[in-house]
Amino acid sequence: MTEIAVFGAGFVGLCTAIALRQRGRDVILVDQQGVGAGASHGNAGVIQCEAMVPYAMPREVAVLCRVLLAQDSSVALRYPGVFKLLRPLASYFHHSAPKGVARAAQAYSKLTIDATQAHVVLAELSGAQALIRAGGYRLRFTDTSAMEKSFAHFTHMAEKYSLRMRALSAAEFHAVEPGIADTGVGAIEWSDPHHVEQPQQLLQRYFEYFQSIGGELLIGDALSLSAERAGWSFNTAHGAQSVAQVVIAAGAGSGRIAQHLGGSVPIIPKRGYHAVLSNGRKLHAPLIDAERGFVYSPQGDHMRVATGAELGAKGANANNRQLNAAVAQAARLFGTDKTPVSTWSGVRPCMPDMLPVMGPSQRHAGLWYNFGHGHQGLTLGPLAGRLLAEALTGEAPLDPALSPARFLL
């Protein structure tokens, strides 16, 4: 009998399988579609060591009204699907109060502070050092008061967590990004984060390393999981499998799996879109359009533009309103083609309390969870994988704030 099956072949699941294999455990990685088919395919390529505070829901009445009236391009609501999320969204709103954000940041900052080094170590082992680059990222502003407000907020964060951050005037911004046609009023730069120009290549290198240390990938469905006296059984393209322990690290799909196993998870599925664009002027570091929520990332000879969040769209047809606006803005700022080389949409698994779900199940022996990393699956993948593996093997306990027990899983 195989010792452990890890379900989910994105950054979090793959890195969990790697960390377990490094500790000598017999591991198989299981996914319905293969490596990086979910949200790991659609990330913006930024390893956000500065993301000490998770994304909270805006609580200002003016901002919420703009979202409800579809006047905020960083968030889109899909009706009637969003009505199914009212309960978890209400919980998200509650946890987004200052006390809730501070409580979440206390646990979250312990993760992000070590996230970059965890990537560096795994990149060295997998020969992927050249894919990870220093240089930070920038946020572009068109409104002076908005930039000043953000700078004051970021200054507090930077001082608290010993991070480097600076404001750039329009002229200074243009000097570091001469290819941009409109600098707005300037930019704020976080200097410490790293970025990955080819996230899919990085994931593939990590997977090849997993194979080189004896790991195996099987195509299978976690919804076929069944508890047995000595462990778990499930179906794969290679036939039925039996394992002693299971780790669920399937991103947004983890909610359905937990439900299949008798639990109920209030995941807020935030759908995102991206387009790969060609023939534009060079972008040297990732750029966030602070007031629109678009993210522009250098991707070798191309540029990837990603949107903000769409709520209530799970299972619905793609709505390209946000993406079309982002593509048009990229063409205006960098001269990229208005017809994308490729497009993608997928769902990020976000939790109402803004913290990932990591640890052993309270319902089933031999069942572990590692999901709910929201916008930071790329950032936290290697670290989250290592921490879960350390807990499963008895090396070190996980932070109780991340426990599945808080959702009765």
Image (cartoon, rainbow, N blue to C red):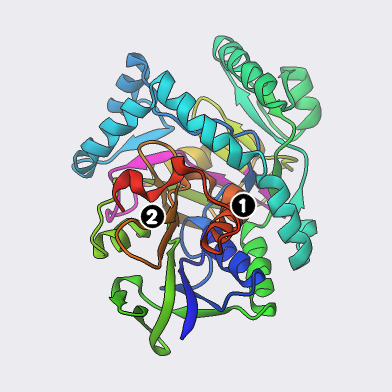
Q: Amino acid at mark 2?
A: Ala
Q: Position of residue 341 (x, y in %)?
A: 56, 58
Q: Position of residue 21 (x, y in %)?
A: 62, 72
Give 3 or 372, whichever is nearer the viewer. Answer: 3
Decide: few, some or many residues near mark 1? Use Cα within 10 Å; few <14, some 14-19, many ≥20: many
Q: Is residue 195 above or below residue 122?
A: above
Q: Is residue 9 above or below residue 243?
A: above
- Is disc 1 placed on a helix, strand or loop? helix
Q: Which residue is mark 2?
A: 252
Give left or right: position of 43 versus 364: right
Write the start and end of the magenta stretch as one range: 297-319
Q: Position of residue 305 (x, y in %)?
A: 56, 45
Kindly identify which numbered label has been placed on residue 383: 1
Decide: few, some or many residues near mark 2? Use Cα within 10 Å; few <14, some 14-19, many ≥20: many
Seen at 32% across and 15% down, the residue is 61
Kindly identify which numbered label has been placed on residue 232: none
Give left or right: position of 114 versus 35: right
